[in-house]
Image (cartoon, rainbow, N blue to C red):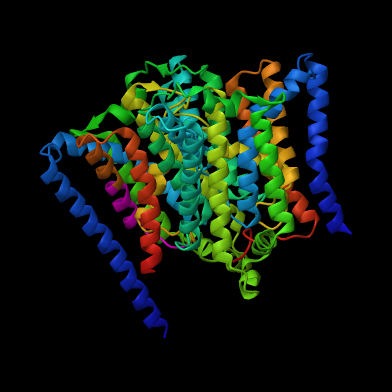
């Protein structure tokens, strides 16, 4: 009984918060509840949504990926550089960027799975390494002149539907299918529930975890490409702090930091919540520095609520007391 | 049986420290061969001065990591404590009071992180990531993004002063290392930090007040970050809200290179001292050899991962 109550709470919090914010911003500013603005929210937060999906996969298996912002910047810059400097066709450059993201994700996975490093340390190292490589590759200057074929992915539309929206909806559908309908998805939940049990049940734990980090890297790279295309240039400092937004989105969306609990669609609503908050604050002319403070507070609050509802549900945190 | 275990453990500890010491010497030798600027007195003093800032932060970071935690907020806490204290001293507060204020601010931010960890059970890297964002945002808001500059000499003394021809920061960091050593090795509190890191449940059931132990290490880490900040702004005569970005990397690198384990309860102050020196020499060497600053982050990230992999392998 208490368990199902906690589940209900876990699943509905994000919608309640989202509703509260939408009502609040609709009342306080008349530029919020306008069709164009709502489309903007869906398009401008594509990178948050994509990385939140990747983060959800990693968190469900009991890990974390702090490197998504840096990986997004690096892979966005790489694909942009391949177009602007090497003259590759946009599609090939983008695919190579995604492959790079997958590779970086696999390095994260390898450090965690085979190096047995705690996930936050392994991916924190990657955060530093990938950002450094981004600055080196771009010479700390933006890469622009990407051509229409590249910019189409951030600015174009098909029958009036913006490309970034098409991309993230496709990814969300695919990844939701992967998690809920395939053996791989079952394995991810099993590992997050109890890695030891999963291993004893002959789940290929190492490979599955590698894939979750690989997918997180790939989606981060895709986020970086969309971000680059949307602003017509790859910025060396792009997506700084994106990991904070992605983790906040996932946790607001009911994904447990301890693995095994959560799903992608509600995590997407978590990302939209983060997006609505940012958009609404912009309309209320909250300066960027206070926005940063609020983002930090929201992250801490979201996790605190998550921990509290877990206690209500009778779950005991796995890292809190023993091991 | 028990004595056998102890022997094996100390043998491995010996290998760890010996290996670290040898690689430190090898790095120094390499650098003195590669560039004749390395071994100059002014350069070595410079290395020590830079090491002092990271060293002070690393002592707090080490204690946090010993309790299975992490403090990602050190750089942001440093910045916020220093811009407020710096502003206070410019508005005519006595330097001594401003210095105490700075340390108290650092300690209170550590108290907040520690409370999030101990009372709300928030994982340390999330709690301190949140604190990092909040503190940085507060520092930027407080100063409107502008650096606070122009401090009186007595406020700058901790960072810019000399004593018997030796920079004051070197005395401070030596003192902090000594205090850290005494705290960890000779006091009950130090024993409790190790005991908690080794096995939190066992520590709890042995009647230790585990919450206070964890709170203490975060408060210490915050206060030491602020102290390091006083040295930094004293030297630069300027406290920018963006100062000390990424300092958590250097501190974590020094601590893990020094052999402190993320599994908690394992680590020595000697190891951390060597780790701090090694990172300082590495930074200095990369500067002397004109390695672009972008690659320095890459190298540090790689050093953290490689050091951890190395210790996993030999443990």
Quarter-of-image position of residue B237 = top left
Determine the image quadrant of residue A179.
bottom right
Q: Which residues are magenta?
A: B265-278
In the image, what residue occupies the spot 71% across and 61% down? A316
**Residue A34 percent across, percent down from the top left:** 79, 17
Left or right: A51 in relation to A186: left
Judged left or right of residue A257, residue B76 is left
Q: Nearer the viewer, residue A193 or A303?
A: A193
The x and y percentages for residue A315 are 75, 60
Image side of residue A124 versus residue B172, left or right = right
The mark tally for this picture is 0
What residue is drawn where x is 32% and y is 20%?
B153
Q: Is residue A231 above or below residue A314?
A: above
Q: Nearer the viewer, residue A238 or B244?
A: A238
Residue B258's image quarter?
Answer: bottom left
Name above or below for residue B271 compared with residue A30.
below
Residue A103 showing in the rendered view: yes
In which quadrant of the rendered image does the C terminus of chain A lie?
A: bottom right
Is B274 covered by the magenta stretch?
yes
Q: Residue A211's spot in the image, x, y percent?
A: 56, 56
Residue furthest to the right: A1
Residue A308 in the figure: left or right of residue B239: right
Asked if B8 appears above or below B287 in the picture, the reply is below
């Amino acid at each position: 009984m208490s368990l199902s109550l906690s589940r209900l709470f876990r699943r509905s919090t994000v919608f309640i918060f989202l509703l509260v914010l939408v009502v609040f911003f609709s009342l306080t500013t008349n530029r919020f509840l306008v069709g164009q603005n709502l489309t903007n929210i869906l398009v401008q937060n594509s990178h948050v949504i994509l990385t939140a999906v990747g983060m959800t996969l990693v968190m469900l298996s009991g890990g974390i990926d702090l490197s998504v912002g840096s990986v997004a910047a690096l892979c966005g810059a790489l694909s942009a550089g391949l177009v602007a400097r090497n003259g590759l066709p946009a599609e090939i450059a983008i695919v190579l960027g995604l492959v790079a993201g997958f590779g970086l994700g696999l390095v994260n996975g390898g450090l965690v799975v085979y190096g047995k490093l705690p996930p936050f340390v392994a991916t924190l190292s990657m955060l530093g390494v990938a950002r450094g490589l981004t600055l080196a590759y771009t010479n700390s200057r933006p890469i622009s002149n990407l051509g229409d074929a590249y910019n189409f992915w951030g600015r174009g539309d098909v029958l009036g539907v913006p490309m970034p929206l098409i991309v993230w909806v496709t990814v969300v559908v695919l990844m939701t299918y992967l998690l809920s309908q395939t053996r791989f998805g079952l394995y991810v939940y099993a590992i997050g529930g109890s890695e030891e049990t999963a291993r004893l049940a002959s789940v290929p734990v190492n490979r599955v975890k590698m894939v979750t980090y690989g997918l997180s890297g790939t989606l981060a790279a895709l986020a970086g490409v969309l971000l680059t295309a949307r602003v017509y240039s790859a910025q060396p400092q792009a997506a700084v702090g994106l990991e904070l937004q992605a983790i906040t989105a996932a946790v607001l969306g009911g994904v447990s930091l301890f693995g095994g609990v959560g799903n992608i669609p509600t995590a997407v609503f978590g990302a939209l919540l983060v997006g609505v908050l940012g958009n609404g604050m912009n309309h209320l002319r909250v300066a960027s520095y206070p926005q940063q403070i609020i983002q930090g507070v929201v992250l801490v609050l979201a996790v605190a609520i998550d921990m509290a509802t877990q206690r209500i549900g009778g779950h005991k945190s796995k890292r809190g007391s023993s091991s | 049986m028990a004595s056998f275990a102890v022997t094996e453990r100390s043998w491995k500890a010996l290998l760890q420290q010996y290996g670290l010491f040898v690689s430190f010497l090898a790095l120094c030798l390499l650098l003195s061969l590669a560039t004749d600027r390395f071994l100059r007195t002014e350069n070595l003093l410079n290395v020590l001065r830079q090491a002092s800032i990271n060293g002070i932060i690393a002592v707090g970071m080490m204690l946090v990591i010993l309790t299975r935690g992490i403090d990602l907020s050190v750089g942001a806490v440093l910045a916020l404590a220093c811009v407020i204290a710096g502003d206070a001293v410019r508005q005519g507060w006595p330097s001594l009071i401003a210095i105490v204020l700075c340390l108290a601010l650092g300690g209170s931010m550590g108290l907040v992180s520690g409370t999030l960890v101990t009372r709300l059970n928030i994982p340390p890297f999330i709690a301190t990531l949140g604190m990092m964002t909040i503190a940085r945002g507060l520092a930027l808001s407080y100063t409107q993004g502008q650096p606070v500059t122009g401090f009186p000499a007595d406020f700058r003394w901790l960072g810019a002063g000399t004593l018997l021809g030796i920079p004051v920061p070197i005395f401070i960091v030596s003192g902090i290392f000594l205090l850290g050593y005494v705290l960890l090795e000779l006091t009950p509190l130090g024993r409790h930090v190790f005991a908690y890191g080794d096995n939190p449940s066992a520590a709890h059931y042995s009647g230790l007040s585990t919450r206070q132990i964890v709170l203490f290490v975060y408060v210490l880490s915050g206060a030491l970050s602020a102290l390091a900040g006083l040295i930094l702004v004293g030297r630069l005569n300027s406290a920018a809200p963006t100062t000390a970005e990424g300092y958590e990397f250097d501190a974590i690198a020094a601590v893990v290179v020094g052999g402190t384990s993320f599994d908690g309860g394992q680590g020595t102050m000697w190891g951390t001292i060597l780790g701090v020196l090694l990172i300082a020499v590495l930074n200095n060497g990369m500067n002397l050899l004109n390695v672009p600053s972008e690659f320095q982050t890459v190298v540090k990230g790689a050093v953290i991962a490689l050091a951890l992999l190395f210790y996993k392998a030999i443990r």
